[in-house]
Amino acid sequence: MWLALSVSLAAARMPCGTEEALRHAPPPARAPRAAAPPSEPAHRDPYGVENVRTSANFAVRWGPDYIPEEQVTQLLNAMEIAWSVQVTNMGHPRPLGTDQWYFNVYIGNTGGGAPSIGDFGGFQTFDSDGYPMIVMNPLTLDDEDGAEATAIHEFYHAIQSSLGRYPYAGLGAWYWEATAEWAAASTRPTNPAVGSSAYGYALLPDLPVNFFDYPDSNALQESHQYGAFLFPWYLSGLFGPELIRDTWVIPGSSDDPLEVLREQLALRGEDFDAVWLDHIATLAAWDFPMADLWHDEVTYLANYVGSRQYAGVFSTDGRHEPLRREGWGEAPGRYGFNVFVLQDPRFGDVDIEVTGDALGDAGSPATFVARVVHIDGYDARYTPLVFDGATARATVPVDGADQVLLVVGALTPATTHWDSETFAFTMTMSIGEPPDPGSGGLSIETPKPTEPVPSVCATGAETWSPLTLAVLLALRRRSRAPNRV
């Protein structure tokens, strides 16, 4: 018996949303810094709030509203853990002003001059003197795990803001959030609230890795830049946290973190595109260190949000039943990818062919990369697909695999359409030998969709607020996914 499937993915996404730099704009003019750190930091409070408690490096301040003492202690402990890992161990420079003063962490909405925070779980900004500070929502403090994850995430923003390496806009905006979440995961990997936005990246793999949409409408794609921490997480697992640190600490003229990562990997004798292909293949298989921390949550949430985790899922329930397809994906953007799943293939060899269009939908030259992944229980095996021009072919034995995945990614040189252009291709997977003409053998091909796949924005798809997603996650792990910027 011969079974074949083919898919043609065409560009079908519309960009939506606008970028805003509300929290990470360049700081105002700063007061002069002390020549040398004092033996103990000094107090500095532009808001004049009445309550304060300190640790070695931080001052937590709040107004007259009651805040439980244990919550203040937990917050101070989280901040010192962040300092210990991100500054002391990883070697990031200390935030501006901390060579002289305590770093201020305000509990917002507590009256008496304390900053307001609205509905945010926490954010980092600058005070009136031009120094970084953090504002925490008192409601966030009710969840110890969520408060710790938020505080550590925001502290890395303070380091980023002090360095000013990339603008919080354009090509650089995603990297602020992705690496702040990477820093939180690296600091407290066992905290169940850390990395809780992984779904935003894993469920929308066709979006460019550096896609950014400011979180102002609760659309799924507004979580993408947070979930994209999985890329720096993968990189630091291979090359150490110093790689990510150096992309912030070492000065340079490029505002594109991807190009800076390319330069840093080249210094280490690695090719960025090859490493990125490894990343997307291992992400499709959830085959990287500590992937189980986030895989179950992503799988769970895929049932509730607009997932494009798989561009197509095909199954053979028996030797004489046709392939069944569930869902269509969208053509990938620049440094985005699609995953196709062949479930329970059972027999034979899998013949695979991928043919990409020469140009993206905005006219940029297209390059494609692909890999086949065999999933057998908890083990993953990888087979490269080598492109000859725009086409790649491979024949791989099923060899007892539970699933065969095809991962296809799109590359192109830097382009002005980096966040919106898509790159179409066709793919074919076939099992067994083609039947002889007239033999009555089974030959099944899935048709190309006759209508373009509607975009999340164009269809007005249902959106999910951070609170709704948090409730869903809480049903599984009793921990809230904090909303942080």
Image (cartoon, rainbow, N blue to C red):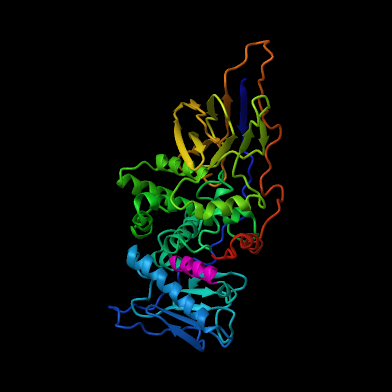
Residue 180 in the image, given as x and y percentages of width and height: 46, 61
- The stretch drawn in magenta includes residue 289: no
Residue 279 in the image, given as x and y percentages of width and height: 45, 44
- The stretch drawn in magenta includes residue 153: yes
| Vertical order, 166 against 137 (above or below) | above
Question: Which residue ends up furthest to the left in the rendered image?
Answer: 36
Q: Which residues are magenta?
A: 144-156
Quadrant housing residue 454: top right
Residue 98 in the image, given as x and y percentages of width and height: 37, 76
Q: Quadrant of the C terminus?
A: bottom right
Residue 74 seen in the figure: yes
| Vertical order, 57 against 476 (above or below) | below
- Relative placement, left or right, of 243 versus 209 is left
Closest to the observer, 457 or 188: 188
| Vertical order, 426 against 63 (above or below) | above
Residue drawn at x 58%, y 63% is 481
The number of discs equals 0
| Vertical order, 63 against 440 (above or below) | below
Quadrant housing residue 217: bottom right
Residue 256 seen in the figure: no
Closest to the observer, 255 or 201: 201
For the stretch drawn in magenta, what is the main secondary structure?
A: helix
Quadrant housing residue 483: bottom right
Residue 107 in the image, given as x and y percentages of width and height: 53, 79
Closest to the observer, 288 or 155: 288
Q: Quadrant of the N terminus?
A: top right
